[in-house]
Amino acid sequence: MPDVTADHYPPGTPCWVDLMAPDQRAALDFYKDLFGWQGEIGPPEVGGYAVCTLNGKAVAGIMAAQPMKEGDPTPPTVWTTYLASADADATQAAISAAGGTVMFPVMDVTTVGRMLMAMDPTGAAFGIWQPVDFFGAEKVNEPGALTWNELHTSDIPEAARFYGKALGLGSAPMEGMDDYHSLSVGDRPVGGMTTLEGAPPGVPSHWLTYFAVDDTDSTVDALVKAGGTVLVPPFDMSAGRMAVVQDPQSAVFAVIKAAM
């Protein structure tokens, strides 16, 4: 169902995505026009973080890209995938024990939750979210909302080992697709994992965010008119019709109209 009615996501499940953009206001306007999101720059105590909503339900966050401290480079303009945790401190220890790198250790986010940022051994960055007052995306799998999270990695066996040990995620090749694995919590697929084949040279391992749309081609047309870029034009595949695109500030994401 599009509305998430549980009060938490099972540990290991992608539960939230957010964007760091050099121009937060422009990003808010772009995604409002593209997906119908509503969102305003937040108060100073949360660094201006904006929680974007679709029909009154939280779907994603957008924040201004700022160096963590003076002299640091500005973070890249990317969509970040957050995986759910019941205990962020224990997950942080498990990430380190499994060979991952903790980039920003566990921190409290006012009263809404606890988070950390990490990198897997193949170089893909991701977040961890432990809910307190806020469990994550309240609407998924409908046009304008998050629908899939996919790890593109330089080393599938190593990534599978890491996410299994650190977060309890299972992995298995999808039938007839040797280079595509499902990531699962228990028996439930919650994401995908594939190679970097076809990516431009130098592209590191990364998580790709998919948003559902009601018409892939018209969404791509609207994105181009708003200053975005098409990286992979619309094409049909087993899950539906999808495209990989870049917003005007260079953040990469995918859009898909699911197969009926």
Image: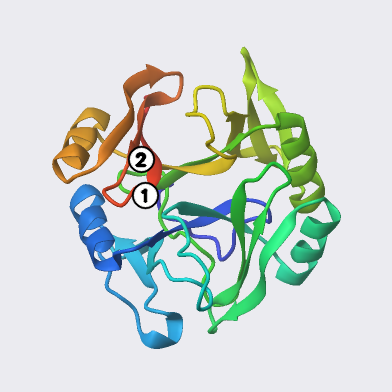
Of residues 195 and 135, which is closer to you in this image? 195
Mark 2 highlights which residue? 212
Instruction: State the image coordinates of residue 258 (x, y, percent, origin top left).
Output: 38, 30
Instruction: State the image coordinates of residue 189 (x, y, percent, origin top left).
Output: 62, 37
Residue 48, disc: none
Left or right: residue 249 versus residue 71 is: left
Looking at the figure, which quarter contains the C terminus? top left
**Residue in the image at 81% along x and 64% along y:** 93
Instruction: State the image coordinates of residue 169 (x, y, percent, origin top left).
Output: 73, 44
Left or right: residue 218 versus residue 174 is: left
Left or right: residue 156 versus residue 72 is: right
Instruction: State the image coordinates of residue 110 (x, y, percent, origin top left).
Output: 53, 84
Mark 1 highlights which residue? 145
Q: Is residue 207 above or below residue 5?
A: above
Amino acid beneath label 2: Ala
| Distance CA(mark 1)–CA(mark 2) | 6 Å
Q: Is residue 60 above or below residue 204?
A: below
Residue that protrudes farthest toward the top in the picture = 176
**Residue in the image at 30% along x and 52% along y:** 249
Amino acid beneath label 1: Ala
Element type at marker 1? loop
Contact, CB < 8 Å: mark 1 with mark 2?
yes
Of residues 90 and 156, which is closer to you in this image? 156
Q: Earlier in the sequence, mark 1 or mark 2?
A: 1
Of residues 86 and 195, which is closer to you in this image? 195
Left or right: residue 114 versus residue 71 is: right
**Residue in the image at 30% along x and 39% along y:** 213
